[in-house]
Image (tube, coloured by chain):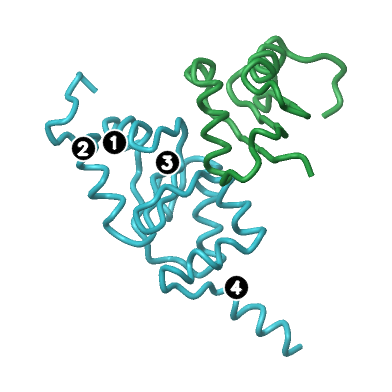
Chain colours: A green, B cyan
Amino acid sequence: RSFASQTDGESRLVRVLQEKFPRASAIKVVDISGGCGAMYEIHIESEEFREKRTVQQHQMVNQALSEEIKHMHGLRIFTSAPK
Amino acid sequence: GGGAEGGGGSGSREAVERLVREHPVVVFMKGSPAQPLCGFSNAVVQILRLHGVEDYRAHDVLQDPDLRQGIKDYSNWPTIPQVYLNGEFVGGCDILLQMHQNGDLVEELKKLGIRSALLDAEKDQEKK
C-alpha cells in the first residue's frame, strides 16, 4: 500500500508507540481494515526487544497499546531487534 | 459475563487452566477446525494440518462468552486465536506462522512427542 497520508488512527498509534518504545529504530502502523480503524498491523523494531521471546515482545506491544486495543477488532504484530 | 468472577464459571482461571492442560495441543479459536469462522483462526488450523496435527483440542469461543473473556484474562493476550502447547501459551496466528516458517514449530511438536508431517514430506522431496 503506498497511499501518501496516514489515517488518524495510524498516526495516533505511531505516537503512542514512539512514547512507549523510546529506543525503537523503526515503527510502522498500517490500518488493514480499509481505513475503518478496526484492524491494524504493527511493525516495530527496537533494542528493547533484544533477547526476548517473540511472545514476550508481542506482550510488550499489547501492554503499550492496551487502551487502544480495546477499540480494535484485531491486530497483527511484527517485532524485531535491530540487526 | 455478569460479574461471575472465580467461583468456577467457564471463564474462571481454574476452568481455563483445566482446558489448557487437557491435551498437548489446545487451541482457542472462532469456529471449529472443520469450520473456522475467522481468517486468523483458519490460519492456525491450516498450519497445524500442514504438520499433520489433526488430533488436538479446539474450543470455539464464539459459543461461550465467558470463555472468550476468560482466555484473554488468563493469557493476558487480547486476541483470538490462542495456541497452547503443553499447557503453555505460545501465541496467536502470527507467532504460529513465524514458528512454522523458521522451523521452531517442528521442534516444539517434537518436544511433545509429535512428529511433524513436514519431516516426512522433506524426505519424499529428497528422493526425487
Image point 17% across, 30% down: which residue? B6
The amino acid pointed to by label 3 is Lys
> Which structural element holds mark 2?
loop
> Which structural element holds mark 3?
loop
Tags 1 and 4 in contact by the CB under 8 Å rule?
Answer: no
> Which structural element holds mark 4?
helix
Label 3 in the same subunit as label 4: yes
Numbered label attached to residue B10: 2
As measured in the structure, the alpha-carbon distance from the residue carrying label 2 to the one carrying label 4 is 36 Å
Numbered label attached to residue B118: 4
Place of residue B111 in the rendered image (x, y in percent of width and height, measured from the top left): 45, 69
Tags 2 and 3 in contact by the CB under 8 Å rule?
Answer: no
Tags 2 and 1 in contact by the CB under 8 Å rule?
Answer: yes
Label 3 in the same subunit as label 1: yes
Name the residue beneath numbered marker 1: B67
Q: Taking B55 as reference, is A34 above or below it?
A: above
Name the residue beneath numbered marker 3: B30
Crowding at dot 2, Cα within 10 Å, few <14 / some 14-19 / many 20+, comes out as: many
> Which structural element holds mark 1?
helix
Crowding at dot 3, Cα within 10 Å, few <14 / some 14-19 / many 20+, comes out as: many
The amino acid pointed to by label 2 is Ser
Place of residue A17 in the rendered image (x, y in percent of width and height, measured from the top left): 65, 20
Chain label for disc 1? B
